[in-house]
C-alpha cells in the first residue's frame, strides 16, 4: 500500500511541477518544493531527502556535465558576439530566401546543434535572426518558438549520428558505444521526425495567413551590437568552420588517436576537446574583433550557470523520485513490460524525461537504474548495444519538452511569448512526434532486427 501511495505522490509532484512551470515559475525553486511533496508521500524524511538525495543528484549531474555546458555556452556566445552565427544564418537566408522563412530558421538550428552549440545557447543566437526573418516574411512571431524548438530540441540532439550533444553522449557511459551508434536507425528516426514536423509547421503558417495574421513587433527585442556591415563577405565561413571542427574532433580525432595507440578518450573527455577546438577556431577567425572576445567569454561562462542549474534541479527532483517506494513499482513495470527491451527502454526514458523535464536528466536516471539489466538481456538475446544507445537517446527527446522543461522555459522567455501563445507548436514538433517515433522504432527494431 505504501508503494501505491508513493506512486500517487510521484504523480502529484510531477503535476505540480508542470503546473507551476506552465505559469512561468523558475524550476530552481519549484523542483525542490515538488521533490518535498514526493518525499512526503514516499515516507522519506524531508531534510534528508532535500539535503541528501536532491542535492546529491543535482551535484553529481553538475560534476559530470558542467564542462560541456560551460564550454558550449562560451563557444555559442563567441559565435553570437562576433557575428559568426548571424553571418552563417544570413548566408543561408540569402540562398533560401524569405519565402522559405521556416527553413531559414530550422537549418541554422540544425547546423549549430550538430556543430556542438548547446540548444540553450542556440535559442539566444537564433531568435534575433529568426525574428528578422519572420518580420520580413510577415509571419506571426508567436510561431517562431515552434520553429526554433523543432530545429534545436530534437533531430540533431538525439537522432543524427555523431551529434556532440550530451543527449547523444550519455548512453556511451552505459553501453560502451560511441556517438555514431546505430547510424541506420538514427537516419530513419531523423526522417520520421523531420517530415511530419516540418509539414505541421508549414500548415500552421498557411493557417495563419488564411486568418490574416501578421507580424507584430516585440518591444523587448534588442539586436546584438556587432556591425554586420563591417564584416567581410567571407565571414559566414567563421560560422561554418568551427561547427565542422567540433564534429570532426568529436567523431574522427578520438578514433585516429586510439588507432595510433596515443590515447583513448571517454565521450566526456572528447566533447571537452572538441568544444575547445571550436572556441579556438572561432577566435582565430575573428582576431580583428579581439575586443569582443573576452567579454563574450565572460558572458558565456556566466550564462552556462543558468542552463546547467535548470537541468540539475530537474535531475535533483528525479533523484528523489528514484528513492521512494513508488519508483520500484515503475522500475518493475518497465523491466517486466511485454515486448522487446528496446520498447521497455523507450517507455522508461520517456517517462523519466517527462518526470524530470530534462532529456539528459531523465535519461541519466533511467540508465543508472536500468541499463545494467538491459545490457545483460541484450547480451542474452544478441541485441547490439548500439540500438539501446540510440533508442535511449531518441526517447530522451520526447516527453522531456513538457511545459516545465528548462529549454522550453528559456525559449519562451527569450521570445517573450507565453505558453498559451506558442507552446502548442513546441509540443507537437518536439514532444508528440518524437514520442511516437521513439516508441514506434523501438517496437519495430525490437521485433524485426
Image: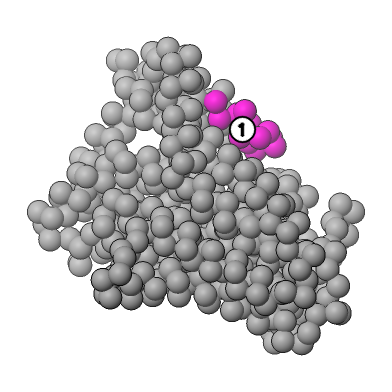
**Image coordinates for residue 159, horizontal then vertical, percent:** 43, 65
**Image coordinates for residue 161, horizontal then vertical, percent:** 40, 70
The relative height of residue 55 versus residue 274 in the rendered view (above or below) is above
Residue 79 shows up from this direction: yes
Q: Nearer the viewer, residue 8 or 281?
A: 281
The residue under the point 77% across, 87% down is 233
Quadrant position of residue 52: top left
Numbered disc 1: secondary structure: helix
The residue under the point 26% across, 46% down is 371
Q: Main secondary structure of the magenta part?
A: helix
Residue 199 shows up from this direction: no
The residue under the point 42% across, 12% down is 45
Quadrant position of residue 239: bottom right
**Image coordinates for residue 374, horizontal then vertical, percent:** 21, 48
- Pick out the residue farthest to the left: 380
User: Callout 1 environment at 10 Å: few (<14), some (14 to 19), or many (20+)?
Assistant: some
**Total labels drawn:** 1
Left or right, 365 with reference to 422: left
The residue under the point 84% across, 56% down is 221
Residue for badge 1: 28
Please report the bounds of the magenta region as a residue range. Answer: 19-32
In the rendered image, residue 86 lying in the magenta stretch gets the answer no
Amino acid at each position: 500500500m505504501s508503494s501505491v501511495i508513493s506512486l500517487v505522490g510521484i504523480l502529484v509532484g510531477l503535476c505540480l511541477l508542470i503546473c507551476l512551470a506552465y505559469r512561468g515559475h523558475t524550476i530552481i525553486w519549484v523542483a525542490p518544493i515538488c521533490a518535498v511533496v514526493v518525499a512526503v508521500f514516499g515516507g522519506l524524511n524531508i531534510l534528508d531527502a532535500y539535503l541528501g538525495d536532491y542535492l546529491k543528484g543535482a551535484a553529481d549531474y553538475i560534476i559530470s556535465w558542467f564542462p560541456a555546458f560551460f564550454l558550449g555556452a562560451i563557444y555559442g556566445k563567441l559565435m553570437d558576439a562576433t557575428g559568426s552565427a548571424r553571418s552563417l544564418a544570413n548566408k543561408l537566408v540569402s540562398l533560401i530566401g524569405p519565402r522559405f522563412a521556416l527553413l531559414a530558421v530550422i537549418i541554422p538550428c540544425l547546423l549549430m546543434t550538430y556543430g556542438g552549440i548547446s540548444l540553450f545557447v542556440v535559442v539566444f543566437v537564433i531568435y534575433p535572426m529568426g525574428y528578422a526573418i519572420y518580420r520580413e516574411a510577415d509571419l506571426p512571431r508567436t510561431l517562431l518558438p515552434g520553429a526554433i524548438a523543432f530545429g534545436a530540441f530534437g533531430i540533431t540532439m538525439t537522432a543524427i549520428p555523431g551529434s556532440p550533444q550530451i543527449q547523444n553522449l550519455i548512453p556511451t557511459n552505459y553501453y560502451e558505444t560511441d556517438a555514431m551508434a546505430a547510424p541506420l536507425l538514427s537516419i530513419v528516426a531523423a526522417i520520421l521526425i523531420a517530415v511530419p514536423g516540418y509539414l505541421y509547421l508549414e500548415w500552421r503558417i498557411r493557417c495563419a495567413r488564411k486568418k490574416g495574421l501578421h507580424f507584430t513587433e516585440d518591444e523587448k527585442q534588442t539586436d546584438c551590437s556587432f556591425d554586420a556591415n563591417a564584416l567581410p563577405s567571407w565571414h559566414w565561413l567563421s560560422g561554418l568552420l568551427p561547427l565542422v571542427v567540433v564534429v570532426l574532433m568529436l567523431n574522427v580525432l578520438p578514433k585516429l588517436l586510439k588507432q595510433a595507440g596515443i590515447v583513448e578518450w571517454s565521450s566526456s573527455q572528447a566533447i571537452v576537446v572538441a568544444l575547445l577546438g571550436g572556441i579556438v577556431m572561432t577566435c582565430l577567425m575573428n582576431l580583428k574583433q579581439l575586443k569582443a572576445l573576452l567579454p563574450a567569454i565572460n558572458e558565456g561562462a556566466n550564462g552556462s550557470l543558468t542552463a546547467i542549474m535548470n537541468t540539475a534541479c530537474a535531475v535533483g527532483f528525479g533523484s528523489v523520485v528514484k528513492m521512494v517506494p513508488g519508483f520500484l513499482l515503475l522500475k518493475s513495470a518497465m523491466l517486466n513490460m511485454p515486448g522487446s527491451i528496446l520498447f521497455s527502454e523507450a517507455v522508461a526514458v520517456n517517462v523519466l524525461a517527462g518526470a524530470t523535464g530534462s532529456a539528459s536528466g531523465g535519461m541519466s536516471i533511467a540508465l543508472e537504474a536500468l541499463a545494467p539489466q538491459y545490457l545483460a538481456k541484450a547480451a542474452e538475446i544478441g541485441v547490439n548495444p548500439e540500438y539501446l544507445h540510440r533508442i535511449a537517446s531518441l526517447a530522451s527527446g520526447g516527453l522531456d519538452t513538457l511545459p516545465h522543461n528548462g529549454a522550453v522555459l528559456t525559449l519562451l522567455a527569450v521570445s517573450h511569448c507565453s505558453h498559451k501563445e506558442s507552446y502548442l507548436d513546441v509540443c507537437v514538433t518536439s514532444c508528440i512526434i518524437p514520442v511516437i517515433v521513439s516508441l514506434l522504432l523501438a517496437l519495430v527494431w525490437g521485433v524485426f532486427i
